[in-house]
Image (spheres, helix red, strand yellow):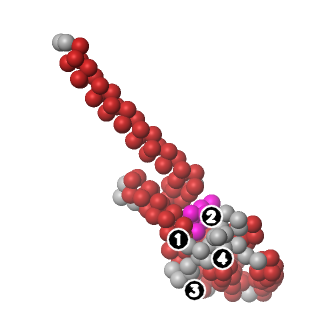
Amino acid sequence: MSTGTLLAIIIPVVVVVALLAVVITLFVKRRRHLQQRFGPEYERTVEGADSQLAGERELRSREKRHDALDIKPLPSSSRERYSRDWAGVQDEFVDRPEEAVHDADRLVTSLMHERGYPTENFEQQLRDLSVEHSRTMEHYRAAHEVDALGTAHRATTEQLRGAMVHYRALFDELLADGGGGARHARA
């Protein structure tokens, strides 16, 4: 074989290998970004999808939807009001635990709404929150589940107490995140 023929074979092979390396690197970077951003929610979404690519596509669509939302910080007066309201819900737990858990759910939903999250559908709330608050999604799911049991008067006091702790995790994150807000504020 002549040098020209060898070069005609080797150069396209090298170009294809280089392109494959670039594509693989981009996929790995994108996957790593999603894993870091969504934490445990990444695994949950991928496991629930038809394939890893379908799960990752779902997570990217969540990011796009979230970017289109007008998530805003809370004024300090609203943060203080929510803190007082939460203290009232906690006090209510002693005498009326089921109602307190339900009120905690409503308070978290109200806080989400004031921050700019849509609140019409629980599953959509989870998807929207998972972009910035992925580490508290299991708390929110667990609390919401106990709230449903409590509404049917089937939750134990210990489950209700756990739900309050779970709601508090998301509540604190939403409240704190609403305070500094520069990364959420829109010009």
* Disc ID at residue 115: 4
The picture quadrant where one finds residue 105 is bottom right
**CB under 8 Å between callouts 2 and 4?**
no
Number of residues whose C-alpha sits closer than 10 Å to that of mark 4, classed few (under 14), some (14–19) or many (20 or more):
many
The picture quadrant where one finds residue 93 is bottom right
Number of residues whose C-alpha sits closer than 10 Å to that of mark 1, classed few (under 14), some (14–19) or many (20 or more):
few
The residue under the point 70% across, 65% down is 182
The residue under the point 19% across, 12% down is 2
* Disc ID at residue 152: 3
* Position of residue 161 measured from the top left corner of the image (x, y, whole percent): 72, 74
Callout 4 secondary element: helix
Number of residues whose C-alpha sits closer than 10 Å to that of mark 3, classed few (under 14), some (14–19) or many (20 or more):
few
| Tag in front: 2 or 3 | 2
Of callouts 2 and 1, the N-terminal one: 1
The CA distance from mark 1 to mark 3 is 37 Å
Q: Which residue is mark 2?
A: 133
| Quadrant occupied by the N terminus | top left
The residue under the point 59% across, 74% down is 70
Q: Is residue 25 magenta?
A: no
* Position of residue 144 measured from the top left corner of the image (x, y, whole percent): 59, 76
Q: Of the residues shown, which amino acid type is indicated by label 1?
A: Ala
**CB under 8 Å between callouts 1 and 3?**
no
